[in-house]
């Protein structure tokens, strides 16, 4: 790990540029370690943090840390399983809930899930994006926990809307979980009461969303043929596919070269400085795709709602066309070269701000921070539904687009989406 990454890890776990001296062993040392590791893993990813970094950030020796956890993986696993259990348990209702209405039961579950997510915000990031680095048995256990949570929400939505199909219930349950846990994807802040109220309202709107009929079949976007002479473009596509399938740390330049039909890794360096340069190029493309659509949409729209509806359609279509790129955009930012991060963050921030500005013109009751939270939730919903259902007809573009509208507007758009 580079010196810059070590410094970032220390700051992630301690909030300071240098480790603090700890004079006595606190009684809650394991809790401190769990919180510190969650912050470090969330900031730099599982592969970007070492036990030495976590120990240094806490101001203790590596030996002291190993007395509590035998390995980095053990620490990582325990935290993910703890948060998985907490989220699953949040869906458990008390005995007296048998007398409650369907809306009251769902509201109670939502409040508990939102509270648990806020309390464990740093670690929820790991559950969302780093769980793929769990060993197979552990990953299966976490998936079981998530399935139990989604099934619980599906059962309560079914009480509220018995006309829905099983697939409809699955879509709405995933959308609700996505909206709540999207707060782990960014660092925007809101007072807890305001955040709970905002997320509760968004999830209630999702639970009553009038889903369009599912399509009979979904036509996969045709793959764009890349001429053999466009090796730089072919390398970028193959790199993104490998990063998506296996994670950036587990992919080598040699494997990217082989996937692109190059005879040796050295050929990659004629087009890119290295693996990290390929990742940065992918991020620039994803960020530019979102930002470049804003001007034309605003210029051609009759009002802010129409502009946002157009942007939603563009965002969904682009995400469906490049699912791997959309996923990588969420999962691998910590691996982008440091010199690229500021520029990329600025593009991301300006795009979110423009979406939020348009949203506030539609919903004047929202504060700037509340609008930003909803924009992040709408973006997250697209990637979460995509990775949960792929190209299933019941999660087609029209449905995903409508759910984005519901998250942002609290209702379907009054402006028809482009066909």
Image: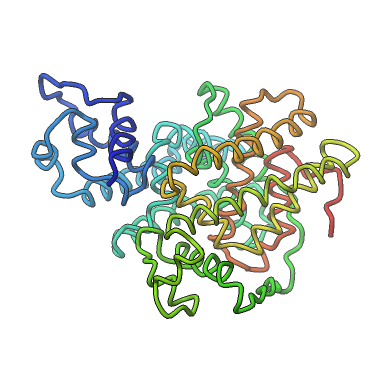
Q: Residue at x 57, y 56 (%)?
A: 326
Q: Position of residue 25 (x, y in %)?
A: 11, 24
Q: Position of residue 362 (x, y in %)?
A: 79, 31
Front residue of this view, candidates 359 and 409: 359
On screen, residue 354 versus residue 196, left or right, reads: right
Q: Position of residue 157 (x, y in %)?
A: 60, 49
Choose top left, top right, bottom left or bottom right for residue 205: top right
Choose top left, top right, bottom left or bottom right for residue 195: top right
Image color mode: rainbow
Q: Residue at x 23, y 37 (%)?
A: 54
Front residue of this view, candidates 302 and 203: 302
On screen, residue 240 versus residue 38, left or right, reads: right
On screen, residue 397 versus residue 416, left or right, reads: left
Residue 158 appears anywhere in the view: no
Q: Residue at x 59, y 62 (%)?
A: 323
In this rendering, is residue 135 above or below 351?
below
Name the image quarter holding the C terminus.
bottom right
Q: Residue at x 71, y 74 (%)?
A: 219
Residue 24 appears anywhere in the view: yes
């Amino acid at each position: 790990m580079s010196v810059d990454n070590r410094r970032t890890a220390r700051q992630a776990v301690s909030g300071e540029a240098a480790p603090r001296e700890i004079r006595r062993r606190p009684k809650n040392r394991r809790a401190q370690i769990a919180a510190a590791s969650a912050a470090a893993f969330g900031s730099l990813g599982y592969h970007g943090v070492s036990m030495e970094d976590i120990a240094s950030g806490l101001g203790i020796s590596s030996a002291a840390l190993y007395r509590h956890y035998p390995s980095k993986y053990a620490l990582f696993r325990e935290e993910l399983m703890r948060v998985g259990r907490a989220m699953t348990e949040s869906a458990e209702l008390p005995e007296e809930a048998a007398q409650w209405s369907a809306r009251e039961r769902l509201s109670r579950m939502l409040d508990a899930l939102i509270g648990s997510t806020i309390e464990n915000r740093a670690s929820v990031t790991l559950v969302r994006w780093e769980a793929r680095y769990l060993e197979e048995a552990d990953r299966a256990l976490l998936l079981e926990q998530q399935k139990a949570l989604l099934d619980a929400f599906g059962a309560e939505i079914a009480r509220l809307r018995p006309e829905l199909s099983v697939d409809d219930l699955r879509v709405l349950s995933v959308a609700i979980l996505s909206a709540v846990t999207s707060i782990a994807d960014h660092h925007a802040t809101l007072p807890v009461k305001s955040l709970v109220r905002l997320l509760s309202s968004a999830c209630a709107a999702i639970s009553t969303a009038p889903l369009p009929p599912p399509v009979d079949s979904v036509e996969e976007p045709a793959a764009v043929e890349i001429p053999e002479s466009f090796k730089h473009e072919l390398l970028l596509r193959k790199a993104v596919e490998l990063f998506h399938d296996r994670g950036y740390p587990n992919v080598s330049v040699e494997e990217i070269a082989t996937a692109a039909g190059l005879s040796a890794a050295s050929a990659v360096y004629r087009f890119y400085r290295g693996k990290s340069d390929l990742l940065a190029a992918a991020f620039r493309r994803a960020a530019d795709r979102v930002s470049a659509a804003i001007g034309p949409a605003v210029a051609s729209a009759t009002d802010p709602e129409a502009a946002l509806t157009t942007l939603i359609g563009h965002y969904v279509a682009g995400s469906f066309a490049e699912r791997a790129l959309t996923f990588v955009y969420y999962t691998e930012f910590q691996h982008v070269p440091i010199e690229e991060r500021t520029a990329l963050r600025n593009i991301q921030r300006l795009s979110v701000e423009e979406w939020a500005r348009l949203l506030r013109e539609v919903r004047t009751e929202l504060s700037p921070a509340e609008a930003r939270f909803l924009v992040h939730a709408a973006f997250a919903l697209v990637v979460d539904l995509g990775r949960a259902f792929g190209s299933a007809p019941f999660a087609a573009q029209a449905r995903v687009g409508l759910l984005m509208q519901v998250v942002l507007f609290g209702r379907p758009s009054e402006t028809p989406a482009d066909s």
